[in-house]
Amino acid sequence: MKALIETRKKRPERVFLVGVELKSRNLADTRDSLAELGELAATAGGEVIGDGWQKVVSLNPATFIGKGKAGEFADVCRRQDVDTVIFDDDLSPAQSRNLEKIFNCKILDRTSLILDIFAQRARTREGKLQIELAQLQHLLPRLTKFWGHLSRQKGGIGMRGGEGETQLETDRRRVQDRIAKISRELELVRQQRGIQRNGRQRNNWPLASIVGYTNAGKSTLLNALTGADVLVKDILFATLDPTTRRLRLPTNQNVLLTDTVGFIRKLPHGLVEAFKATLEEVVQADLLLHVVDISHPQAEEQIAAVNAVLAEIGAGGKPTLMVFNKMDRLNPDGTGAGGAGALNRLQERHPNAVVISAVTGEGIASLLAEIGTQLRPKREFLELRVPHEQAAVIARLHKVGQVISRNYRGPAARFKVRIPPQHHDEFAPYIVREAQASS
């Protein structure tokens, strides 16, 4: 018996998925969303044993889907020994309570599942605080589900003042106190990030942030460009905590490159709010590298989902370079999992996009060149004349600037260079003139 219990505990949770097809959606969208929900469930450690959906005109305020359909799904779940039923949309506290009575098992919605995954993945103290804040904000209106069976505490000896608080009121106050404390701690984190950002800006290095749908290859790209050692895994939300590394471009320009948390369709608003301290790196960036898994059949929908989150955090108008990743997964004719002509269609919509494979390195040189072009306005184009004996000045010029041309004939060396504006005064004694940008 003990061995049987241990075996049962070790098996993954058996999960059944439920979605709805509304007028604003079609069946293909519902199926795609459920497929992604299945990936999320697998990432959380569950085993998807089935799914179902219902076409409805409007959502049922009591049971989300129709009561009859809920009963039908509940019968399937009992036969399949399902542990958890996950709905592809947010459930109200009342809907969750009613559905638990019908299914007689654990009920989760998409937000609860994503929060659980984030809680598993967070590694830094900041990340854990952000996740806890989002979880508590999600839990607060649902406390009645846990404490509705408890009666009001009675007054009496040691409890003067009449009727005491209900357990619900006590726990709600505790949750609110914890939310306030975490919010204060995250405000300190935000201030610290601001100080760090100001320190970086003293070097006047531009900041580029890698954004994109989860599992699009952002961390792989950061590793390929900078030699970082960020975790790379073929699962959703493999990394949550941002990583910043220095990238030196072929133009001899330094750029700070930050890998950020991946986005997803129906990303909970509370999660976006909780991660604002992290996402400020995106808002403050000079350039966004929007990484897209070009081999994914819903690449265009994923682009739209990322753009929606960027707009929500106030980064919708940022200069953006589209990076179509995973070209190694496409067939030679440009087709792949996304269907025939997927790459061509996206290139027509985004003519300045760069096509790469972060795994094989193909296209990385073109990407670096395009990043340099996008950030070029931050560098002055000058013509300098430096005496040959000023070897230290010439070495410094090669270190901080991009040397376009050089001529060592004559009593002094002549250079056409691009240098960051903060180094203008350093080379001012040697400036002959401002060169033409077209030179």
Image: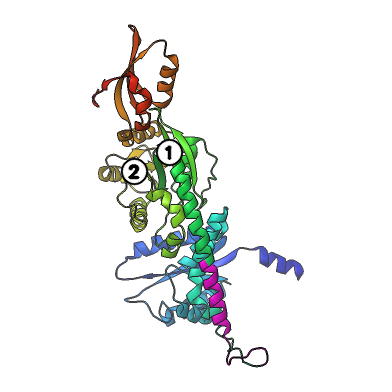
Q: Amino acid at mark 1?
A: Arg
Position above or below: 328 against 94: above
Is 255 left, or right, of 26 in this rendering?
right
Which badge, 2 or 1, comes first in the chain's sequence?
1
Q: Residues within 10 Å of mark 2 (few under 14, many from 20)?
A: many
Report the front residue among 241 and 230. Answer: 241
Work out whether residue 213 can be spotted: no
Work out whether residue 349 can be spotted: yes
Q: Residue at x 46, y 42 (%)?
A: 199
The residue indicated by pointer 2 is 322
Position above or below: 241 against 48: above
Residue 308, given in percent of the width and then of the height, sits at 34, 57
Residue 3, given in percent of the width and then of the height, sits at 75, 66
Question: In the orientation shown, which residue stands out farthest toward the top?
Answer: 410
Report the front residue among 202 and 287. Answer: 202
Please say which color scheme the image uses.
Answer: rainbow
Query: Where's the C terminus, which quadrant?
Result: top left
Is 431 left, or right, of 291 in this rendering?
left
Position above or below: 355 against 139: above
Secondary structure of residue under mark 1 = loop
Residue 202, which numbered label?
Answer: 1
Q: Residue at x 49, y 64 (%)?
A: 134
Q: Is 277 in the magenta?
A: no
Query: Where's the N terminus, which quadrant?
Result: bottom right
Question: In the orientation shown, which residue stands out farthest toward the right?
Answer: 2
Secondary structure of residue under mark 2 = strand
